[in-house]
């Protein structure tokens, strides 16, 4: 009955082709206009999973309490010396705070004035004692340098320091690091290089770690989720501000941006990268494949128009159903071209075979519909069921893709059965001179018949033997691995993971203030936990003792910072001071060969060259030393004025980042071990949740995302198999035939996953989308073969069916294969898995399934007409269509009248 109905539909469309084309043009035009006017993409990835999940509710509550944690840009500023990075950060913060259009808040995480003033209090007692001793020893030098901040003062300070050698306060070798740093600065200035002297390094006895000199600025931007890159305007404004403040020019600083916003924007940007070129190449290859399959440019034109119209209708329908696309559902276009075109190819190839047999175009079009109508209908329904199976799951991003793609399968089927026949009749492809198929594969067909048991047994054994390998199947839970590791945002974030001041993968917990101590104790007992911080962590311990030591140092050092300022030196004064310092260095170096004397003679030579250089060169060297001197003296003076830090006098911005509006306290739980290790991160999240089930944060969210997505795919897979099995039963009415369709599909799926496990290819959030595609494509191919086998067809490898399946698979492979070459790692892995799954599916359909089915079963005796309706025998259609075409055989009224008469 279905074949008969579709034959009548095609008959109508062929005879009224101009009406069909007019309606199609009208609908396509409306759909295109609707899609263009309503096209929107919501790039908020937090909406990809249902907010009804318990852990998502905790996540959303945390994000509401601390929105800056998940909608921030972290500006990372590095410079050759710590002073330059601090100056650059201060300049950038000042510039950004005035831009309320792009930024909601700006905060210097490492250079906050409050912490600069109280920095000494946050040192432990031993480190504080060492620091204050060094400051005390430097007091006589500060007395010279602080009021005279120029080359003369620097030279006098050096000479004064050398006189300490006479008093035996230290040895010349102890000054090696200081002398070498000074030489590096002078030599760099004389050579015209960017040079800067670090007084912080001098105080620490040598260069400090790069992360200790790094400045971090937290920027909460204004986001535009209607744009593909919501934070692009803000990140552009940050870079423009950095250029305007001269970060590179004046401070020789490097700016890098990371954090949730740049990472997300970078992912969407990488998705666009090369998309236009890939699209053109893919379209060209698709058209070439269509020509190889159809061998007629007229037919290719008809199929191309059909697919384009179907895509426009699907786009409009999808936007009407979901409102705005998400980062996953935007892939519906690729799915439609890859899968929807399958129906057009199947019908067109069948038409060519019928045209060869019947000669006339119109009877061939109708006969093709009668021949492939049921397989195409069932394949479209099964593919739609595979995609719609995601609707009941919590993976909303994929559910929306499934909804659009499922509807797209229906649209593709409808246009293939209505518009395509009308277009083919309009363009009038030339007659088919040769029989379709692959006659050279006749020997392979004979082998499959003779050795079908061997083929089935070997394939089954291979599939079963690979099952134990599934225990090694990897699923990559780390979302960062799906992004370009060489991108600025990802590379910087992985570098920051080693910085103890920032915990990119920390877990977070909100607890009432009264429960903080108990929660900390429980978490501290967890082996995977490195530390637990709260707002109380910013109140230094043992403050009475530390403040006493600081007050004593202040009484000794403070007078040195307020000496009388002498008149500004002339250039001759600078030269004289430099030559005197050089002589002092030569005197104390003597002919010694240890590190101190060698460094002293090197600096003496450099100072002599500087005295002989031009005034401009001396000015540049002086700036290299003094530009960072002022801020250091100011910070030193401020640190000596430290006061007791209490919970009540902490900065308001800091408090707001640790205390929720409802007064709950945020606990930050740091992971022990490598924060970039996915297995360690997952174990950390599980351990934290075991003792604190209400925890959230990056580590927990990553772990829960993986669990939720795996559960969604397991549910969707079960729903899809049940729905497809039900559809097959409704049409096939035989459990055996249903199994003949599903078993090859399951074998292909098993082989695909087993190859992934054996090759170490990890499944991830992106490429796992290939599995529902495998169901959609795979079940369609299997249905084509089973229904052809039920009609009594055999020798499949040399048949036109295999030709259609082969080119359909090539079409799908081309649509998705271009993803393999994407610069986005997640998209590229999806292309690889799709290519693998298509290869396994095609091999299973063309080789394993014919061997599994064997010879067609004998036709069953037709029941008496008095007991049920006479079966519609498609074998009679082809022989009668040509004779009946000009009669009333396809007249709907006469067909119904004849049918009732037979009843």
Image (spheres, grey):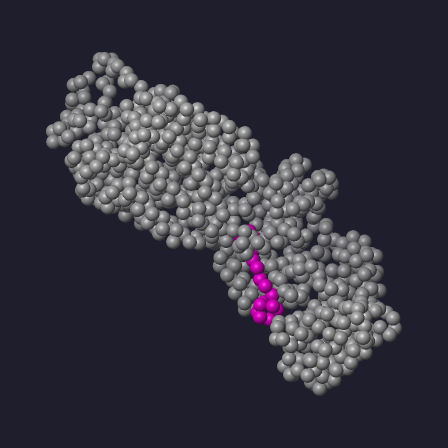
Q: How many marks?
A: 0
Residue at image coords 23%, 22%? 872
Would residue 627 be visible to someone looking at this image? no
Is 263 rendered above or below residue 310?
below
Q: Quadrant of residue 557?
A: bottom right
Q: Residue furthest right?
A: 167
Residue at image coords 62%, 62%? 78
Quadrant (top left/top right/bottom left/bottom right) for the C terminus:
top left
- Residue 202 placement (x, y as % from top left): 74, 67
Residue at image coords 22%, 14%? 865
Quadrant (top left/top right/bottom left/bottom right) for the N terminus:
top left
Residues 646 and 764: in front is 764
Q: Residue furthest left?
A: 887
* Left or right of residue 177, residue 662 in this image: left
* Left or right of residue 47, residue 116 in this image: right
- Residue 473 placement (x, y as % from top left): 54, 35
Is 239 rendered above or below residue 559?
above
Asked if residue 258 is among those painted magenta in the image, a careful observer would answer yes
Residue at image coords 25%, 15%? 862
Q: Which residues are magenta?
A: 246-264
Residues 427 and 592: in front is 592
Would residue 460 be visible to someone looking at this image? yes
- Residue 110 placement (x, y as % from top left): 66, 59
Asked if residue 717 is among those painted magenta in the image, a careful observer would answer no
Residues 294 and 441: in front is 441
* Left or right of residue 724, residue 350 in this image: left
* Left or right of residue 851, residue 210 in this image: right
- Residue 724 placement (x, y as % from top left): 39, 28
């Amino acid at each position: 009955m279905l074949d008969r109905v579709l034959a009548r539909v095609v008959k109508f469309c062929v005879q009224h082709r101009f009406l069909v084309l007019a309606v199609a043009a009208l609908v396509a035009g409306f759909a295109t206009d609707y899609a263009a006017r309503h096209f929107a993409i919501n790039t908020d990835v937090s909406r990809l999973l249902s907010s009804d999940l318990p852990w998502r509710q905790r996540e959303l509550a945390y994000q509401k309490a601390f929105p800056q944690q998940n909608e921030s840009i972290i500006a990372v500023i590095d410079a050759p010396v710590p002073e330059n990075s601090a100056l650059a950060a201060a300049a950038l913060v000042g510039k950004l705070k005035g831009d309320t259009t792009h930024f909601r808040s700006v905060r210097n995480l490492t250079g906050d004035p409050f912490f600069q003033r109280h920095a000494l209090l946050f040192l432990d007692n031993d480190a504080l004692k060492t620091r204050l001793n060094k400051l005390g020893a430097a007091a006589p030098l500060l007395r010279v340098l602080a009021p005279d901040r120029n080359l003369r003062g620097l030279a006098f300070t050096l000479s004064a320091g050398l006189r300490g050698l006479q008093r035996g306060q230290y040895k010349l070798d102890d000054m090696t690091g200081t002398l070498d740093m000074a030489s590096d600065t002078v030599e760099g200035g004389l050579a015209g290089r960017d040079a800067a002297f670090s007084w912080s390094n001098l105080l620490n006895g040598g260069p400090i770690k790069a992360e200790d000199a790094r400045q971090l600025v937290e920027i909460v931007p204004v986001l535009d989720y209607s744009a593909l890159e919501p934070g692009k305007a803000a990140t552009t404004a940050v870079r423009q501000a950095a250029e305007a403040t001269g970060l590179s020019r004046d401070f020789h600083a490097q700016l890098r941006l990371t954090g949730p916003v740049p990472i997300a924007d970078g992912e969407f940007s990488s998705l666009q990268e090369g998309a236009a070129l890939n699209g053109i190449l893919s379209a060209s290859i698709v058209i070439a494949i269509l020509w190889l399959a159809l061998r007629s440019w007229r037919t290719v034109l008809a199929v191309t128009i059909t697919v384009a119209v179907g895509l426009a209708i699907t786009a409009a329908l999808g936007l009407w159903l979901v409102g705005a696309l998400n980062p996953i559902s935007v892939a519906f276009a690729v799915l439609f071209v890859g899968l929807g075109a399958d129906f057009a190819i199947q019908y067109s190839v069948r038409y060519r075979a019928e045209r060869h047999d019947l000669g006339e175009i119109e009877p061939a079009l109708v006969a093709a519909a009668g021949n492939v109508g049921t397989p195409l209908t069932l394949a479209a329904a099964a593919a739609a069921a595979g995609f719609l199976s995601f609707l009941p799951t919590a993976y909303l991003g994929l559910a929306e893709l499934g909804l659009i793609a499922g509807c797209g399968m229906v649209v593709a089927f409808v246009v293939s059965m209505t518009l395509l026949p009308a277009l083919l009749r309009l363009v009038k492809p030339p007659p088919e001179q040769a029989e379709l198929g692959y006659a050279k594969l006749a020997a392979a067909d004979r082998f499959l018949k003779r050795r079908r048991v061997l083929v089935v047994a070997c394939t089954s054994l291979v599939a079963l033997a690979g099952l134990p390998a599934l225990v090694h199947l990897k699923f990559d839970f780390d979302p960062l691995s799906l992004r370009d590791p060489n991108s600025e945002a990802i590379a910087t974030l992985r570098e920051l993971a080693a910085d103890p001041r920032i915990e990119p993968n920390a877990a977070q917990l909100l607890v009432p203030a009264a429960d903080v101590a108990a929660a900390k104790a429980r978490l501290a007992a967890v082996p995977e936990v490195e530390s637990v911080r709260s707002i109380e962590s910013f109140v230094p311990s043992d403050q009475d003792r530390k403040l006493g030591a600081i007050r004593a140092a202040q009484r000794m050092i403070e007078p040195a910072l307020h000496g009388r300022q002498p008149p500004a030196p002339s250039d001759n004064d600078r030269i004289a001071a430099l030559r005197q310092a050089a002589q002092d260095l030569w005197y104390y170096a003597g002919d010694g060969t240890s590190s101190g004397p060698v460094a002293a003679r090197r600096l003496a030579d450099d100072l002599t060259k500087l005295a002989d250089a031009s005034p401009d060169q001396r000015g540049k060297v002086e700036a290299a030393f003094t530009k960072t001197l002022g801020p250091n003296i100011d910070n030193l003076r401020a640190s000596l004025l430290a006061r007791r830090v209490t919970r009540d006098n902490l900065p308001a911005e800091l408090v707001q980042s640790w205390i929720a509006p409802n007064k709950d306290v945020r606990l930050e739980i740091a992971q022990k071990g490598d924060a970039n290790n996915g297995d360690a991160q997952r174990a950390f999240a599980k351990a934290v949740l075991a003792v604190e089930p209400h925890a959230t944060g990056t580590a927990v969210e990553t772990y829960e995302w993986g669990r939720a997505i795996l559960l969604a795919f397991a549910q969707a897979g079960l729903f899809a198999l049940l729905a497809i099995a039900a559809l097959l039963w409704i049409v096939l009415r035989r459990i055996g035939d249903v199994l003949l369709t599903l078993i090859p599909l399951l074998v292909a799926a098993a082989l695909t996953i087993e190859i992934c496990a054996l090759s170490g290819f990890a499944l991830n959030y992106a490429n796992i989308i290939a599995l529902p595609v495998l169901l959609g494509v795979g079940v369609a191919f299997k249905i084509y073969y089973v229904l052809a086998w039920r009609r009594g067809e055999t020798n499949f490898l040399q048949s036109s069916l295999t030709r259609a399946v082969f080119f359909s698979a090539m079409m799908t492979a081309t649509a998705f294969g271009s993803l393999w070459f994407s610069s986005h790692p997640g998209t590229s892995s999806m292309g690889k898995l799709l290519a693998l799954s298509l290869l396994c599916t095609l091999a299973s359909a063309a080789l394993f399934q014919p061997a599994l089915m064997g010879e067609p079963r004998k036709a069953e005796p037709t029941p008496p007409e008095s007991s049920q309706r006479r079966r519609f025998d498609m074998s009679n259609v082809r022989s009668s269509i040509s004779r009946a075409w000009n009669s009333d055989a396809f007249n709907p009224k006469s067909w119904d009248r004849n049918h009732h008469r037979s009843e």
